[in-house]
Image (tube, rainbow, N blue to C red):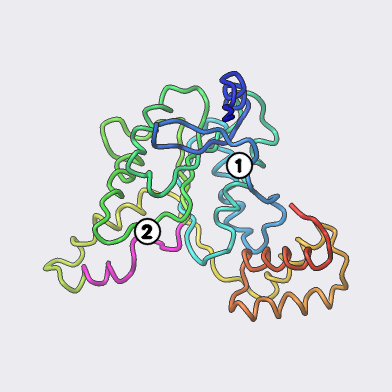
Amino acid sequence: MKTTEKPSRRRNAAATADAFVWEATPGKLHPVRKVARLPLELLKGVDAARDTLMENTRRFASGLPANNALLWGARGMGKSSLVKAIHAEVNAARKGAGRLMLIEIHREDIATLPLLLRKLRDDKRRFLLFCDDLSFDKDDTSYKSLKAALEGGIEGRPANVLFYATSNRRHLMPREMMDNERSTAINPHEAIEEKISLSDRFGLWLGFHNGSQDEYLAMIDGYAAHFGLAIDADELHRKALAWSAGRGARSGRVAWQFIQDLAGELGKKIG
């Protein structure tokens, strides 16, 4: 027999949650009871971005002016992990209505952002909207919805809402698309100005670049210590470097994948 969750239980979850996923259909916020995230101290090699984003988020949570933020750059360097970790860190010292709400909106639902903003505008809480892996391809016009929601339109962005996005692209558009616009347009600058102006709506641009070997090994050491993995340091580094060489990258994602493999090898449960 099919069972459904009781309405009272759903209401309680929504009342106690500080993280949600926006479900464009039917236009509701789904509470997330446990956010998949890592402690802030485990994120290595992103110190400058961490400090800037933390200060910006704390100001916003305290009702002070703050900027929308675009975290862009190399894959797997902890962009989305940083947003989720900072949200948890900011809320650690806050209670009740003072807690900052985190709402994830999926890339394919960006066109419904104006609807979401209307729902949040009169709420007394403060909301951090988060879109992971945001980018737009050729002939995709949904970026106009985001552009208008961030700054434009007669309503403007609600004072209780801030927008953070991560992307591999600094201008959120593929480079070949922008180059093609330049080469074929009578006025190349005007041809791409509208598309580039989207990224200008983000007051903070935080760049993430491929990690050095030292930064990669610092990630490995941090994970191993945090999860209590009993292994000689030299052997740990040897295995970690061999793992990264096999994947051609030294990133936080590669480090985490190695730690998962090592934990399994050692018979240690993590997470």
Disc assigned to residue 172 = 2
| Crowd rating for badge 1 (residues with CA inside 10 Å; few <14, some 14–19, many 20+) | many
Disc 1 marks which amino acid?
Answer: His
Span shown in magenta:
167-181
Q: Which quadrant of the view contains residue 250?
A: bottom right
Q: Residues within 10 Å of mark 2 (few under 14, many from 20)?
A: many
Spot the residue most to the left: 186
Eyeballing the image, is 56 above or below 188? above
Note whether 164 is above or below 115 in the view shown: below
Q: Nearer the viewer, residue 2 or 247?
A: 2
Q: Which residue is mark 1?
A: 87
Q: Nearer the viewer, residue 132 or 92?
A: 132
Q: Secondary structure at mark 2?
A: loop
* Residue 172 location (% of width, % of height): 37, 59
How many circles with numbers are drawn on the protein?
2
Residue 41 as seen in the image, left or right of residue 230: left
Residue 162 in the image: x percent, y percent? Answer: 46, 39
Residue drawn at point x = 73 percent, y = 74 percent: 240
Instruction: Give residue 177's quadrant in the image.
Output: bottom left
Query: Which sits in the foreground, 98 or 110?
Result: 110
For mark 1, give the secondary structure. Answer: helix
Q: Are marks 2 and 1 in contact (CB under 8 Å)?
A: no
